């Protein structure tokens, strides 16, 4: 999709609380997002960006069709979650930065299509910071690098507040994608920054870059904290981050 479809917001600058949380189990992060979403809808917390890495996990969005799971769920090398975001099946795991944005679109622009394009813009700007030229593809959501997908996007919007967001492959083992048709897109592969960039930046460096570009795209004053400071985030229930409701299997496929 042409870049000109995205336009910067004219909304006044506001705060975006952002934190790099390190590796967090999927269900714990999902529960935290739901708590933050409810708090944001009620005006009890600011816009919040969670930056993290997951243990290996497959997630199936609302558009997932049976054919997107090449391998039966019981035979997949990692747990599977049916989740409340848009889009199809994807993988989250080691070597990938996930950016979950809980944001009130009414303070930016109440337009879901524009929001998706803005998330693509964030990913494109992050790639450009490392000297890489990403691409949009007409009719598809996400960002591609050298014809292969490097950033996936899937969101939920409830009462104009968002959750879920984007994932950017930094150094992901491509074998994890073999049992699925990522996002239901046939005939296009998946790539990572490390295949195009040496030396490859670390996950936390990429996370900080994502936070900075979210601030630029959405017109927000970013307050960034590292994992050791995560409980200081306004409105974040620290006990959720400490809870591990499941134990996804790790290792390589």
Image (cartoon, rainbow, N blue to C red):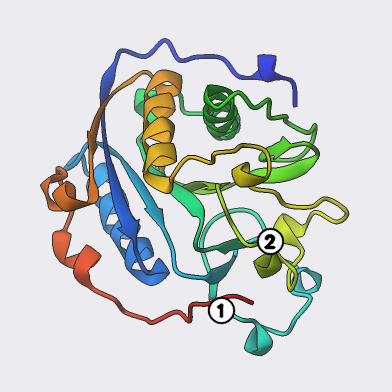
Rendered view: 139 above or below 88: above
Q: Which residue is mark 1?
A: 78
Marks 1/2: CA distance? 14 Å
- Residue 160 visible to the viewer: no
Q: Is residue 6 above or below residue 197?
A: above
Which residue is at a point 45% across and 79% down the rendered structure image? 248
Tell me the tag on residue 49: none
Residue 42, located in which quarter of the rendered image?
A: top left
Disc number for residue 174? 2
Q: Give the residue displayed 41% in from the left and 19% down from the top.
A: 216
At x 20% / y 69%, what residue is drawn?
Answer: 242
Residue 6: x percent and y percent? 61, 19
Of discs 1 and 2, which sits in the foreground? 2
Q: Quadrant of the N terminus?
A: top right
Q: Position of residue 244 (x, y in %)?
A: 29, 76
| Above or below, 54 relative to 220 | below
Disc 1 packing (10 Å; few <14; some 14–19; many ≥20): many
Q: Is residue 32 left or right of residue 133?
A: left
Question: Residue sitting at 48 percent across and 81 percent down?
Answer: 249
Residue 182 lies, in percent from the top left, at 72, 59
Label 2 neighbourhood size at 10 Å, few (<14), some (14-19), many (20+)? some
The residue at the far top in this view is 10
Among the 4 quarters of the image, the one containing residue 102: top left
**In this rendering, would 10 be left or right of 93?**
left
Identify the element where label 2 is drawn: helix
Observer able to see residue 142: yes
Q: Earlier in the sequence, mark 1 or mark 2?
A: 1
In which quadrant is the C terminus drawn? bottom right
Q: Secondary structure at mark 1?
A: loop
Q: Nearer the viewer, residue 34 or 230?
A: 230
């Amino acid at each position: 999709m042409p870049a000109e479809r995205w336009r910067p917001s004219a909304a006044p600058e506001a705060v975006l609380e952002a934190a790099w949380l390190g590796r967090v189990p999927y269900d714990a992060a999902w529960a935290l997002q739901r708590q933050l979403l409810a708090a944001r809808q009620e005006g009890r917390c600011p816009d919040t960006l969670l930056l993290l890495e997951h243990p290996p996990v497959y997630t199936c969005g609302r558009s997932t069709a049976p054919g997107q799971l090449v391998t039966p769920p019981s035979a997949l090398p990692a747990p599977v979650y049916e989740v409340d975001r848009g889009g199809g099946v994807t993988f989250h795991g080691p070597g990938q930065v996930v950016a979950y944005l809980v944001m009130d679109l009414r303070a930016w622009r109440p337009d879901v299509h524009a929001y998706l394009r803005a998330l693509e813009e964030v990913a494109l700007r992050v790639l450009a910071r490392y000297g890489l030229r990403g691409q949009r593809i007409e009719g598809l959501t996400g960002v591609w690098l050298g014809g292969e997908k490097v950033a996936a996007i899937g969101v939920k919007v409830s009462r104009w507040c968002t959750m879920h967001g984007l994932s950017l492959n930094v150094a992901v083992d491509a074998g994890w994608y073999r049992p699925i048709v990522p996002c239901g897109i046939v005939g296009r592969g998946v790539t990572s920054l490390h295949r195009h960039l040496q030396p490859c930046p670390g996950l936390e460096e990429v996370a900080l870059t994502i936070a900075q570009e979210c601030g630029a795209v959405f017109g927000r004053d970013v307050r960034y904290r590292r994992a050791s400071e995560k409980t200081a985030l306004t409105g974040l229930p620290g006990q959720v981050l400490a809870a591990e409701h499941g134990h996804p299997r790790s290792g390589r496929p």
